[in-house]
Image (tube, grey):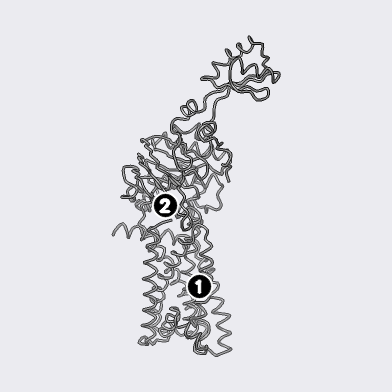
Amino acid sequence: MIHTRGLTRVFTVRRKEKVDAVRGVDLDIEAGRLVAFLGPNGAGKSTTLRMLTTLLPPTSGSAVVAGHDVVKDPARVRSHIGYVGQRNSAGEEHRVRDELVSQGRCYGLRPREATRRADELLDLLDLTPLAKRLPGTLSGGQRRRLDIALGLVHRPRLLFMDEPSTGLDPKSRAEIWQHILRLRETYGTTLLLTTHYLEEADSMAERVVIIDGGRIIADGTAEQLKNDLAGDHVVVTTATAQDAEKAVRVAGGTARDTTVRLRVDRAAAALPGHLRTLDAAGVKVTAAETVRPTLDDVFLTLTGRSLTDDDLPA
Amino acid sequence: MTTFLRDTTTVFSRELRPALRNPVGLLFDMGQPLLFLFLFGTLLDGAVGSSWQWFVPGILVMMCLTGPMGAGYGLLVELLGGAFERLLVTPLNRTAMLVGKCMKATLTLLAQAVLIILLALPLGFEPHAVGVPAALAQLMVFAVGLGALSFVLAVKSAPSGTLFYVVSQSVLFPLLLLSGVLLPLESAPGWLRVLGQLNPVTYVVAAQRALYAGDLADPSVLYGGIAVCVVAAVGLHLGNRAMRKGV
């Protein structure tokens, strides 16, 4: 569905200052997948998406999207893909239903088809009661549902979504995700989305592509990435700092005050044995827990930075 | 070509629909020209005894400068939001986007111009039967060009939008004042008259006045016609380039 080779975009800021927003991205995404681009702000997620959706010509490299080259045949690419941008898609002066009908017309539907499709989408995304409203009168979650509806008018096999849930309250985010997942189940749509919510990438995506500094730095299922790059930890709290040091001598790991962290393969299975070893050595343990890694740990391992550090949603 | 026509219709009807849903908005957009017509026109009438025949064509040109030139504002709003980006991802023909938008701006102007003429009738304005349609046609060509230029300005102003306000405000008033819309340039000192002659709007205003007076063969009609055609050609060319390049 998507194949890129050496996809690169350089922005010229002022006369001589150049910014390499995306540097040589090679990516292959097969049909039917739900893939998340994860990375901090400015990592190149949106720029990559904008090149794949023909909004931005690549500086070099190639991209074939839905069977067509984004540079040589942008019109064909456009008719096969849907796009939900970061900002609101509906014009402020246009009623919800009018805008959906217009969107259908943009994809070449006849007026009657466009109207029928608009009503179908209003129903699908629970927007029917809002059909005559102006976008400005909708809540954040409702507007986002309208954006998604606009992206689905022509039943694309491939849908791009740039931060579909950013800025929404938890309830609206959950609703949006319900719609996205249902869409996939019903139509088998291939989904490529960007997010900076770690939990979302973790729980929803089948494949996570971590981007930093314009490059892909990791690519796999969330489980793979976490196991390979961060791993489980057993964390015990000891009665005293001396006990903690002793625990490190006996069983390894790193101590900080009375807390000892030890990386293991499967934390839940390793915990009982670990506790017996410490007990046999006379280490007094007051609390113990197993810690599964998060994608943030993965990012930390890869870059030495935390994703959450510079990535507070604006 | 059929796709182009279909896409133009799509853009045009999308642009037009909000106006049809709220036709009173058309009147509100005419606030400034209406004020000038009733307040300034009457004042002028009393002060220098200028005729409505002279003043109304000027008001129409003035409306042409504020209306279609402001059309870019709508595009700017869509550029700053995400609506324009959304349309760019559809297979919509880029030239059709420009043409459809220009058609809407031009049609709006036509409706407003007719309204102004009708409102000026009771004041004593006497339109010439052949002159009026010819004048309106010329005005519409001018509107196409100004609308397209305004779209170019909007595209160039993204993402901040500041450029749009700065340029449209700093260009509009000099163009108006130096065109003899409000007061005749004949009584101006020489340097001001020279500036006025460098202003393409001056020729349009002169041509409009000649047409409304029924002097269809007046040379000013030809010069005005050339002026609007040049503005339209330059506007459409630049506009098409801006739309194709996208943002």
Residue matched to label 1: B171
Vertical side of B210 occupied by B109: above or below:
above
Q: Position of residue B149 (x, y in %)?
A: 43, 68
Q: Position of residue A128 (x, y in %)?
A: 49, 46
Q: Residue at x 32, y 59 (%)?
A: B4
Q: Can the viewer see residue A61? A: yes
Given residues A147 and B240, the one toward you in this image is: B240
Q: Residues within 10 Å of mark 2 (few under 14, many from 20)?
A: many
Q: Which mark is residue B161?
A: none
Q: Are marks 2 and 1 in contact (CB under 8 Å)?
A: no
Vertical side of B137 occupied by B79: above or below:
above
Vertical side of A111 occupied by B114: above or below:
below
Disc 1 marks a residue whose amino acid type is: Val
Vertical side of A12 occupied by A240: above or below:
above
Q: Secondary structure at mark 2?
A: helix
Horizontal side, residue B210 vs residue A135: left or right: left
User: Which chain hosts label 2?
Assistant: A
* Residue at the extreme left of the image, as rendered: B1
Q: Position of residue A174 (x, y in %)?
A: 54, 37
Residue matched to label 2: A101
Given residues A307 and B70, the one toward you in this image is: A307
Q: Secondary structure at mark 1?
A: helix
- On the same chain, marks 2 and 1? The answer is no
Q: Residue at x 31, y 42 (%)?
A: A67
Disc 2 marks a residue whose amino acid type is: Val
Using the rendered view, name the quadrant where residue A81 is placed: top left
* Residue at the extreme right of the image, as rendered: A240
Q: CA distance from mark 2 to mark 1?
A: 38 Å
Where's the N terminus of chain B, which quadrant?
bottom left
Given residues A69 and A174, the one toward you in this image is: A69
